[in-house]
Amino acid sequence: MKALTYHGPHHVRVENVPDPVIEQPDDIILRVTATAICGSDLHLYRGKIPKVEHGDIFGHEFMGEVVETGREVKTLQKGDRVVIRLSSPVVTASFAACSSTRPARAPTPGRAPR
């Protein structure tokens, strides 16, 4: 897949990176359909966040379509559309499903719905 990756202050590039894989039973893999750059990304771009490493991927505000779920995920299925409220290396995303038949949201930030 393509991703915007960090290579030092003011140096980013679009690169091919490995596709994600299900690692945990509550993981969800999305096909991102839209994303945006926000103020946090600009701090990263300018080198103001010290723990950013070469190759880290930008973009933590996005939406997409579920393409695969771990075995413990019960409230989302392949094809559901979701909006990500927050995603960072420190805090796992919470999800809001955009299905017209059953909107849902993670009960607490940091945990995907099951």
Image (tube, grey):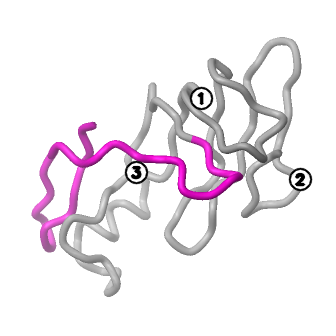
The residue carrying pointer 2 sits among few (fewer than 14), some (14 to 19) or many (20 or more) residues within 10 Å by Cα, namely few
Percent x, y of residue 58: 33, 56
Tag 3 and tag 1, C-beta contact below 8 Å: no
On whether residue 22 falls in the magenta region, the answer is yes
- Majority secondary structure in the magenta region: loop
Q: Which residue is mark 3?
A: 59
Q: Which residue is mark 2?
A: 107
Q: CA distance from mark 1 to mark 2?
A: 19 Å
The residue carrying pointer 3 sits among few (fewer than 14), some (14 to 19) or many (20 or more) residues within 10 Å by Cα, namely some
Nearer the N terminus, badge 1 or badge 2?
1
Q: Nearer the viewer, residue 114 or 9?
A: 114
Label of residue 50 in the image: none
Nearer the N terminus, badge 2 or badge 3?
3
Residue pictured at 45% horizontal, 25% vertical = 33
Q: Which residue is mark 1?
A: 66
**Image-based side of 85 in relation to 56, left or right:** right
Q: CA distance from mark 2 to mark 3?
A: 23 Å
- Looking at the image, the residue that sits furthest to the front is 71
Q: Which amino acid type corresponds to the residue marked 3 in the rendered image? A: Gly
- Range drawn in magenta: 1-28
Residue pictured at 77% horizontal, 61% vertical = 109
Q: Nearer the viewer, residue 63 or 74?
A: 74
Q: Which amino acid type corresponds to the residue marked 2 in the rendered image? A: Pro
Q: CA distance from mark 3 to mark 1?
A: 17 Å
Residue pictured at 31% horizontal, 69% vertical = 44
**Image-based side of 54 in relation to 88, left or right:** left
Percent x, y of residue 52: 30, 77
Dividing the picture into quadrants, the one containing residue 50 is bottom left
Percent x, y of residue 22: 53, 48
**Image-based side of 34 in relation to 46, left or right:** right
